[in-house]
Image: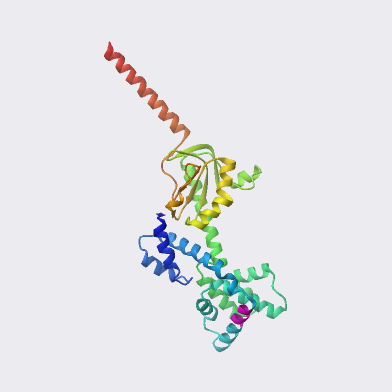
Amino acid sequence: MKLSKAQYDEIARFITTLKPTRQCMRRLKERFPRQSQSTLLSIFSQEYQKLIKRTHARHHSPDTIEMYYSKYLHDIAVDPTASVLLNLANEVDFSPALIARTILERFLQDQNGVMPTKPVLNSMLRDPSLIPDPVLANQINQCIVNDCCNGPLVDCIKHSIGYEHEVLLREKLLEKNLAFLDEDQLRIKGYDKTPDFILEVPVAVEGHVIHWIESKASFGDESSHRMYLQDQFWSYWNRFGPGLVIYWYGFIEELDCHRERGILLKDEFPSDIVTLRGCMALEEGQGQQSKECKSEKSQEAQ
């Protein structure tokens, strides 16, 4: 699904009024019913990640962490069954999963006298039953389950969705009988940075030659596309030639401005692929048609 810059900006402005809970998607869909749920979720996630980056330092200063931890200890003592951490996250307008991580890190430091290692922290966030305090474990679990943008559950979902679309792209290539090499095969050949698929025989899409295809299970906004261009797409172009990027959840249509330089954007697998075999068949057909025309003219002359 392609959106104009104006349409995208309207959605982004509305997102600033929402909290990062699963209920926010209902409001977003009600406000923009013509947009798909997956597109709206992708846009929301990306916009919220930008907010997290802008405000991260403010929520992680030593004084702020102590204030959050003291409030948690006070509120949990008053009512251990209340959603203390989730309410705190909504109150300070920050990610529930990241608030949970901060409080867990401070709790383990309090318990052990030293800062926990990253592997220990990550393992407890992935499996809250490992947390020695059952009340805190329940609080952490609530935050992870109710955060639609951050946390181990969301990371797992994003990884699965990304893999699912790579499999979908592979199936589409096989349906078209296109010969290709995937990332694993290219790494064996010694390539360190590669697109998802390189076509062994180039094809044409909308009049543009394509040597490689990259799958992105996300919406292509300005900041993410700019980063991908810098870190990936132009590197692929330098090494392998022009290519195609599929943003499965859509993109801002004004970003598709590098076609003549060799990077084409689509929001689905193209249906109008022209292969070398197709070109040869077309040329043969045109050649035969030309011969028939010449024969007809010759007969008319006689």
* x 57%, y 51%: residue: 230
* x 51%, y 75%: residue: 93
Q: Nearer the viewer, residue 241 or 190?
A: 241
The magenta region covers 63-69
* x 30%, y 17%: residue: 297
Q: Nearer the viewer, residue 129 or 5?
A: 5
**288 relative position to 168: left or right:** left
Check the image and report above or below for 284 versus 154. above
Q: Residue furthest top?
A: 302
* x 57%, y 66%: residue: 152
Image coordinates for residue 54, horizontal then vertical, percent: 55, 68
**33 relative position to 84: left or right:** left
Check the image and report above or below for 165 versus 129. above
Image coordinates for residue 277, horizontal then vertical, percent: 46, 32
Quadrant in the picture for the C terminus? top left
Quarter assignment of residue 73: bottom right
Q: Main secondary structure of the magenta part?
A: helix
Q: Residue furthest right?
A: 113
Image coordinates for residue 75, horizontal then vertical, percent: 56, 86
Q: Is residue 302 magenta?
A: no
Report whether residue 278 is seen: yes
Quadrant in the picture for the N terminus? bottom left
Q: Is residue 64 magenta?
A: yes
Image coordinates for residue 66, horizontal then vertical, percent: 63, 81
Report whether residue 163 is seen: no
Colouring convention used in this rendered image of the protein: rainbow
